[in-house]
Image (cartoon, rainbow, N blue to C red):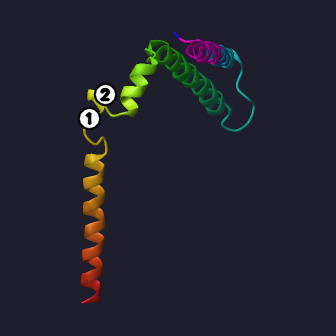
Amino acid sequence: MTEAQATVVTAYTGLSTSAGKAAADLAVTPPPTIEGGDAVATDFATAFQNLSDVYGRGAQTIAAVTPVDEKDRKDQKDGKDPALSGSPTKHLDAQLYVQVTEKRYRGVRRCC
């Protein structure tokens, strides 16, 4: 793991832990005494728990990333990486072509 990865993992883990603690604290705190206070309290506890889960998974994902070396980067940049062969946007390019073509034909029909 690179130093940058370790920094991000540490930050995400800290955010996850803090949000989890906030969710737990909110769960045992009485709800506000306003109309719909129970729902507000539940929503906030759920939001902090979701935030904790997202940052926890993010930390795991970043920790699992395998850093690439300079040769790998150069190969990717030069198009020598077999995983990047072909146009990664070929399908999207075809969809865009169809959409543009359809709009052109619709415009011709409207004129006639």
Q: Residue at x 74, y 36 (%)?
A: 34
Q: Which residue is mark 2?
A: 81
Pointer 1 with pointer 2, Cβ within 8 A: yes
In front: 83, or 15? 83
Residue at 44% in and 13% down: 64
Q: Is residue 98 magenta?
A: no
Q: Amino acid at mark 1?
A: Ser
Q: Nearer the viewer, residue 66 or 59?
A: 66
Tell me: residue 52, above or below residue 41.
above
Q: Position of residue 37 (x, y in %)?
A: 68, 33
Q: Which residue is under mark 1?
A: 85
Q: Nearer the viewer, residue 21 or 89?
A: 89
Label 2 sits on a secondary structure element that is: loop
Magenta residues span: 2-17
Left or right of residue 95, residue 71 in this image? right
Viewer-side residue, 81 vs 17 = 81
Task: Report x, y in % for residue 36.
Answer: 66, 37
Majority secondary structure of the magenta segment? helix
What amino acid is labelled 2 in the image? Asp
Query: Does the stretch in magenta take in 3?
Result: yes
Mark 1 residue element: loop
Q: Quadrant of the C terminus?
A: bottom left
Question: Which residue in the rendered view is the most extreme toward the right?
Answer: 33
Residue visible at 52% across and 23% down in the picture? 54
Image point 25% across, 54% down: which residue? 94
